[in-house]
Image (cartoon, grey):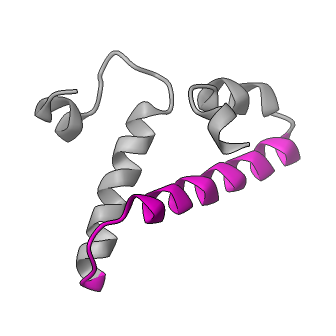
Amino acid sequence: MTLKDIILGLLNRTDIINYLIILGKLCIWDCRKAGIHPDFNIFLKKVKIKFETEKYIANKNETFASFRKRWEAILGKLL
């Protein structure tokens, strides 16, 4: 990835990658506001929370197939 990709996102991607870039930026911002150094474990915890929330919503709305397609790039690492 280039700096431009991180700032703007990957324009040709429709999977979870752009979402994770935004979540990473949010994690860095939250750490900065709290006065702590960013930590990858903090980021992973945020990703897991978002994953579990979207999974619950997908199960409730019976849209698990689209949920699975969206998260398939990292699904095996989160389960």
Task: Report which quarter residue 7 is drawn in.
Answer: top left
Q: Residue furthest top?
A: 12
> Residue 3, how many percent across, how many down?
12, 35
Q: Residue 49, percent across and down?
A: 62, 60
Q: Image quadrant for the C terminus?
A: top right
Q: Residue at x 34, y 15 (%)?
A: 12
Q: Which residues are magenta?
A: 34-61
As for residue 67 lying within the magenta part, the answer is no
Our reading of the magenta stretch's main secondary structure is helix
79 relative position to 8: left or right = right
- Residue sitting at 69 percent across and 56 percent down? 53
How far from the left and from the top, in percent, is residue 22? 35, 48
Side of 36 where 74 appears, left or right: right
Location of the N terminus by quadrant is top left
Residue 51: % across, % down? 64, 49
Name the residue at the bottom extreme: 35
Query: Is 52 inside the magenta-drawn segment?
Result: yes
Whether residue 62 is situated above or below residue 65 in the rendered picture: below
Q: Quadrant of residue 13?
A: top left
Q: Who's the residue at 34% across and 60% down the image?
A: 26
Residue under the image location 40 percent in, 52 percent down: 23
